[in-house]
Image (tube, grey):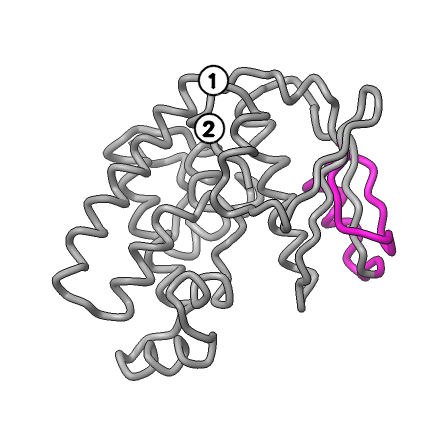
């Protein structure tokens, strides 16, 4: 939902290829800016994931500043409300008339930080390498991995989103992957595991930065996943 290759946050949103004008409506009201998501999600996790990643990205790019002030969700409050409070740490409105983020207008003029751009250059280079490698293989898994590698830091990593980018329906993608003996969830988890090892051991990225690049809502969620994969904490990686 937010890139870091543009000089400012406002330009980042304006250049985001994943959000067309019909997907996101930005309205400025005094010191506040509302980002209203106009797309029709069949599942609430879409908006939840997009906003969680944007909030975490803002905190990563601008430590100590809280530019996102509130989030609104059109769906009803879930039973696990406490988990939302833990991740967002800001006012959350459920049952709203729209899915939206409310931000400080000053956020739009913030200049993106060089360390994060460096981290994304790593992702970009990795994605290009993987894309070239799988083009000759021409497997469905390879195409999915190439697409996911460059999108893990965004919210657009559901099977529906990936299938759409590949020009097919979710059931077609599911069927093609099944013929290759793998599921979409396995592709996503194995790719995250592989990239986590590279970012932590080879690139020496911090745990919180690695978590964000791999699309986790926060470092704690990444640490739990990493421990499932390897049996130990990512903080033990040298």
Where residue 166 appears, as percent x and y from the top left, is 37, 65
Q: Against 186, is 58 above or below?
A: above
Single out the residue that lies furthest toward the front: 21
Locate the N terminus by quadrant.
top right
Closer to the chain start, of discs 1 and 2, is 2
Q: Quadrant of residue 146?
A: bottom left
**Element carrying mark 1:** loop
Residue displayed at 59% across by 16% down: 110
Give the left or right position of residue 73, taking residue 2 as reference. Answer: right
Q: Against 182, is 136 above or below?
A: above
Where residue 7 appears, as percent x and y from the top left, is 47, 19
Residue displayed at 22% across by 70% down: 139
Binning the other alpha carbons within 10 Å of mark 1 as few (below 14), some (14 to 19) or many (20 upward) gives: some
**Element carrying mark 2:** loop
Q: Is residue 78 magenta?
A: yes
Q: Against 208, is 138 above or below?
A: below
Tag shown at residue 58? none
Do the residues under discs 1 and 2 have CB atoms within 8 angstroms? Answer: yes
Q: Which residues are magenta?
A: 76-102
Give the left or right position of residue 39, taking residue 175 as reference. Answer: right
Q: Is residue 9 magenta?
A: no
Where residue 48 appears, as percent x and y from the top left, is 67, 52
Binning the other alpha carbons within 10 Å of mark 2 as few (below 14), some (14 to 19) or many (20 upward) gives: many
Q: Which residue is mark 2?
A: 4
Q: Which residue is mark 1?
A: 113
Query: Is residue 124 at all visible to an observer of this figure?
Result: yes
Nearer to the camera, 156 or 119: 156
Nearer to the camera, 95 or 206: 95
Residue displayed at 83% across by 37% down: 91
The label nearer to you, 1 versus 2, is 2
Where residue 39 appears, as percent x and y from the top left, is 66, 57
Query: Is residue 222 at all visible to an observer of this figure?
Result: no
């Amino acid at each position: 939902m937010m890139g870091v290759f543009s000089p400012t946050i406002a330009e980042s949103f304006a250049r985001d290829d994943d959000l067309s004008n019909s997907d996101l409506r930005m309205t400025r009201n005094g010191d506040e800016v509302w980002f209203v998501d106009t797309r029709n999600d069949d599942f609430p996790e879409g908006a939840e994931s997009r906003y969680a990643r944007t909030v975490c990205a803002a905190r990563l790019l601008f430590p100590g500043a809280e530019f996102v002030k509130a989030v609104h969700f059109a769906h009803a409050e879930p039973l696990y409300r406490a988990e939302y409070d833990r991740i967002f740490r800001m006012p959350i409105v459920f049952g709203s008339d729209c899915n939206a983020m409310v931000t400080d207008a000053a956020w739009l003029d913030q200049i993106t930080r060089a360390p994060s751009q460096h981290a994304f250059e790593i992702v970009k280079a990795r994605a290009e390498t993987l894309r070239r490698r799988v083009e000759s293989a021409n497997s469905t898994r390879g195409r999915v991995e190439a697409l996911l590698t460059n999108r893990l830091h965004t919210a657009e990593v559901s099977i529906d989103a990936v299938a759409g980018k590949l020009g097919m329906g979710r059931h077609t993608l599911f069927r093609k992957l099944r013929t290759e003996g793998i599921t979409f969830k396995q592709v996503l988890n194995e790719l995250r595991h592989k990239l986590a090892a590279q970012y932590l051991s080879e690139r020496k990225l911090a745990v919180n930065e690695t978590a964000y690049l791999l699309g986790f809502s926060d470092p704690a969620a990444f640490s739990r996943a990493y421990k499932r994969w390897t049996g130990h904490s990512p903080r033990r990686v040298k």
